[in-house]
Amino acid sequence: MKYAFSIVILALSLMACNGPAEVYKDKIVVVDSLLVQLESHHARYKLIDSTAINTQIAEIEGLNKILHGPKVNQDDKEFWTTKLAPFELVITPYQKYLRDKAKIEKQLNYTRSQLLSLRKSLKEEVIDTATASKYVLDEQKAMGDIYMLLIKRIEPTIKAQSIWDTSAQKYQALADSISALSINE
């Protein structure tokens, strides 16, 4: 009888001592999912050739001054809506990307370190469930912020690079033809 009581107590103790696979299983799955999303966003970010953008931006801004300068016919709707529209899809994303590049990199790296730290804490059960829930929510919000950066900065910049790679010569030729005009034309 004495042993039966000990076995029951031991069994109850073992059932109460669920490992991290049980206590934080759902939260670990969420964190793992967030890590996969983060890696996907980071992979998209790596598609951007920052070196090329840094070298091209001065040329693009110079062309922009010519293409928007006083020699351009302000009443030529085709020029503004058809010819210049793709150029606008290059300069603005490049400028915004360069402005926010450090912020994007910092946010990607910080979120990765936070997710890895949270995952470790969940596996080791060093935080209580309320704190774990709060941290998971915080990281989901951070991932939403990174997704917005992806939509607002990364994807437009990837598209801008593609446009510029295929149209740089066209805009240089257009700027050269505008530069050749006299102001009275």
Image (cartoon, rainbow, N blue to C red):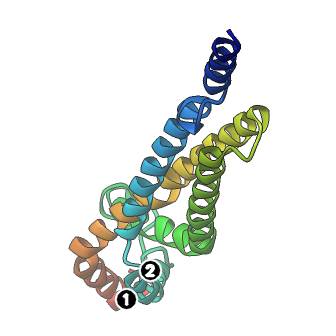
- Along the line of sight, the residue nearer the viewer: 28 or 149: 28
| Residue 164 in view here | yes
Q: How far apart are marks 2 and 1 (CA)?
A: 7 Å
- SS label for mark 1: helix
- SS label for mark 2: loop
Q: Position of residue 32 (x, y in %)?
A: 48, 45
Q: Is 12 located above or below residue 169 in the figure?
A: above
Quadrant, the C terminus: bottom left
In the picture, measured across the screen, residue 18 lies left or right of residue 44, that is right
Q: Which residue lies under the disc numbered 2?
A: 71
Quadrant, the N terminus: top right
Q: Which mark is residue 162?
A: none
Q: Is 107 located above or below residue 28 in the figure?
A: below
Q: Which residue lies under the disc numbered 1?
A: 179
Q: Which amino acid does label 2 sit on?
A: Lys
In the picture, measured across the screen, residue 115 lies left or right of residue 78, that is right
Q: Where is residue 179 in the image (x, y as percent from the top left)?
A: 37, 88
Q: What residue type is labelled 1?
A: Ser
